[in-house]
Amino acid sequence: MRIVIALGGNALLHRGQHPDPGLERANVVRVATAIAPLAHDHDLVVTHGNEPQLTRLAGQETAGSASLDLLGAQTQGLIGSLLVCTLRDVLPGRRVAAVLTHTLVRADDPAFARPPGAVGRHAVPSPRPERILEADTVRALLDLGTVAVCAGGGGIPVVTDGTGALRGVPAVVDKDLAAALLAEELKADFLLLLTDVPSLYAGFGTPRQRPVLDATPAELRRGHYPAATMGPKAEAAARFVERTGGLAAIGHLDAAHEIVHGRSGTLIRPELHVL
């Protein structure tokens, strides 16, 4: 089975932790340990968030003149190196590689006129991902048995000009939507969105809160999950399942293996059509 894993933004820095290289290294060991068992039996692609690292770089005076797309590239290199080194340690003899990944977006995406996202205290556009440019390269690595780390932070956003040339744009692509698109382009069987809660919850924060263990894309959308938390994950899972007929799941990082085997998390499955 081919699995695309989307690590939440808190995988390397947990909620409340301040950016620190030592903490990041310690947390990435936990990440690698959690997902390594899946690599023994499946083709594995690992994507990741970068919000804490990007916010840190964007706030540094030395980074003041750097474009946001280039800062995103720096975080891909930083986090990719940590993940590759640690995954090689827990998967001895296995090929592991990080791919600097670019995500094509439309220059006329409405998000550029109404920036909904934020990095630090600055509003930034979050255009919809249209294509993962290195998807073919990642597919070739998978065919060689390589665990691929890619699409960090949703990928480096780029647009094309009239000649077809690429140029970076100051934006941030939603990492979960990018992971769903990558999974679709790789013809993955399973999209696994890992975070720091056991599952989605209906009525979250109310006395009627309950875990959602199983849902269809339509049921997910009727849940109206908050845009600032689980909304993007729910939408990414719904899109992948609708477009591919595959499975998606949302759950806790430490339960990655159990989620894939149906023993934890929220499973998102295709609609059942009764004839």
Image (cartoon, grey):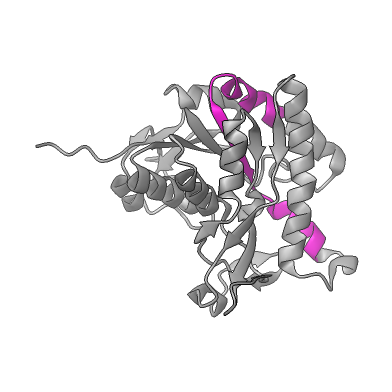
Please tell me how many numbered marks the rendered image carries. 0
**Furthest residue to the left?**
275
Residue at the (75%, 35%) spot, across then down:
84
Residue at 66% x, 49% y: name it: 152
Q: Is residue 13 magenta?
A: no
Where residue 259 sits in the image (x, y, percent)?
48, 27
Horizontal and vertical percent for residue 9?
65, 47
- The outermost residue toward the front is 163
Residue 154 place in picture, x, y as percent: 60, 54
Determine the residue positioned at 77% across, 29% down. 86
Residue 17 in picture, x, y percent from top left = 76, 44
Q: Is residue 198 above or below residue 48?
A: above
Compared with residue 184, is residue 73 higher up or lower down, i.e. above or below?
A: below
Residue 263's place in the image compared with 198, above or below, is above
Residue 150 shows up from this direction:
yes
* Residue 49 on the magenta segment: yes
Tell me the quarter of the picture where residue 8 sits.
top right
Overall secondary structure of the magenta stretch? Answer: helix
Q: Where, by quadrant of the figure, is residue 197 drawn? A: top right
Q: Is residue 7 visible?
A: no
Q: Which stretch appears magenta?
A: 30-58
Task: Name the residue located 53 percent from the left edge and 50 percent from the top edge.
Answer: 176
